Image (cartoon, rainbow, N blue to C red):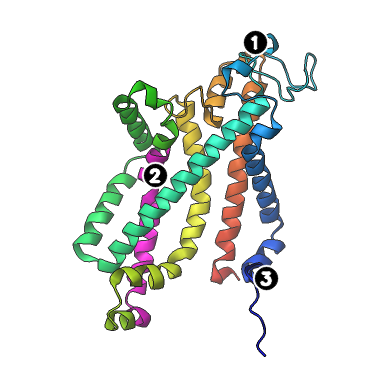
């Protein structure tokens, strides 16, 4: 009688990666913090006193209130309000949703494009490799912010006025992706160039296995370790890029505030005494990026066999 195969949860708990995670206190703290930030943003409509996207819920009578622990602080505005009577905590959680969605979307799209082009360049080589890598070199020679600014400006000029605010998030995802995919493509291309010369790939070719199946089923799984690390670290970078673009005024519109938009508007009132309008969004952005970077650093060390 054969023993039953352990389920997925059991295999995860028995893995070296899980053991490394439980031994790394900073990684556990970062994962807990990141989960808390993501869950609070996801459930923002149920835990915040107002919807900052709805002008009907803004209360000008309660504008410019300080945090609740200060004089004039008022419930339920725990972190105070802005000059339009918008609850700062509600705006931060809703803004975090926009920033996180844009970060996840840009990383996912970059992975799809970068992995696909990297596999093609590394597997086929020749002119395919030369063309794709030269395009990547051109994009790498231009700063990410400039590429994102150019794409955002072109989208604003080409889209009808009614679609500019609706499609602002999609435009940001595309703008960040155009420069982010190159790192994945170069990494996968380097790994694929090595793997395609190994015996298991040569055997698959002799058996007339289609090139697409060889790339996806045989080569891709052996290239995922550096890709996972890069994707984790680039998630934090994508959030920072979105915040920078929104701070410059070419990102998310005021009607759909992200963390960068909140920082931009709050910065105008920093020296007028309403510090809470900028400090708390900045703190939320820092917590998001730091927790992602700590997880990325742990993942890089845990997946590196030389450090075991």
Tell me which secondary structure the magenta stretch mostly adopts. helix
Q: Are marks 1 and 2 in contact (CB under 8 Å)?
A: no
Q: Which residue is mark 3?
A: 10
Element marked by disc 1: helix
Q: Quadrant of residue 303?
A: bottom right
Q: Which mark is residue 18?
A: none
Q: Residue at x 48, y 35 (%)?
A: 242
- Earlier-in-chain disc, 3 versus 1: 3
User: Please, is residue 37 above or below residue 47 in the view?
Assistant: below
Q: Which residue is mark 1?
A: 60
Q: Quadrant of residue 100?
A: top right
176 part of magenta stretch: yes
Q: Secondary structure at mark 3?
A: helix
What span is colored magenta in the figure? 173-201
Which residue is most to the left?
127
- N-terminal of the pair, mark 3 or mark 2, is 3
Crowd band around label 3 with a 10 angstrom C-alpha radius: few (<14), some (14–19), many (20+): few
Q: Is residue 149 above or below residue 185?
A: above
The residue to which callout 2 is attached is 177
């Amino acid at each position: 009688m054969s023993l039953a195969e352990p389920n997925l949860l059991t295999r995860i708990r028995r893995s070296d990666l899980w053991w490394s995670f439980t031994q790394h206190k900073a990684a556990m703290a970062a994962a807990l913090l990141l989960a808390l930030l993501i869950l609070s943003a996801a459930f923002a409509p149920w835990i915040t006193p107002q919807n900052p996207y709805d002008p009907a819920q803004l209360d000008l009578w309660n504008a410019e209130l300080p945090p609740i622990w200060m004089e004039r602080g008022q419930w339920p505005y725990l972190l105070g309000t802005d000059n339009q009577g918008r609850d700062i905590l509600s705006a931060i959680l809703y803004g975090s949703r926009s920033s996180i969605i844009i970060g996840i979307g840009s990383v996912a799209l970059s992975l799809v494009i970068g992995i696909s082009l990297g596999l093609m360049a590394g597997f086929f080589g020749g002119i395919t490799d030369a063309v794709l890598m030269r395009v990547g070199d051109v994009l790498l020679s231009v700063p990410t912010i400039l590429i994102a600014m150019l794409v955002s400006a072109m989208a604003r000029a080409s889209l009808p006025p009614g679609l500019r605010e609706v499609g602002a998030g999609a435009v940001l995802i595309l703008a960040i992706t155009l420069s982010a995919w190159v790192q994945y493509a170069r990494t996968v291309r380097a790994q694929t160039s090595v793997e395609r010369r190994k015996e298991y790939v040569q055997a698959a070719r002799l058996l007339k296995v289609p090139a697409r199946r060889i790339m996806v089923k045989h080569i891709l799984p052996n290239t995922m370790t550096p890709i996972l690390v890069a994707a984790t670290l680039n998630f934090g970078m994508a959030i920072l890029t979105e915040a920078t673009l929104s701070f410059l005024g070419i990102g998310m519109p005021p009607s759909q505030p992200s963390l960068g938009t909140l920082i931009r508007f709050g910065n105008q009132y920093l020296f007028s005494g309403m510090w809470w309008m900028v400090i708390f969004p900045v703190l939320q952005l820092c917590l998001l990026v730091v927790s992602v970077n700590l997880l990325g650093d742990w993942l890089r060390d845990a997946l590196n066999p030389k450090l075991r």
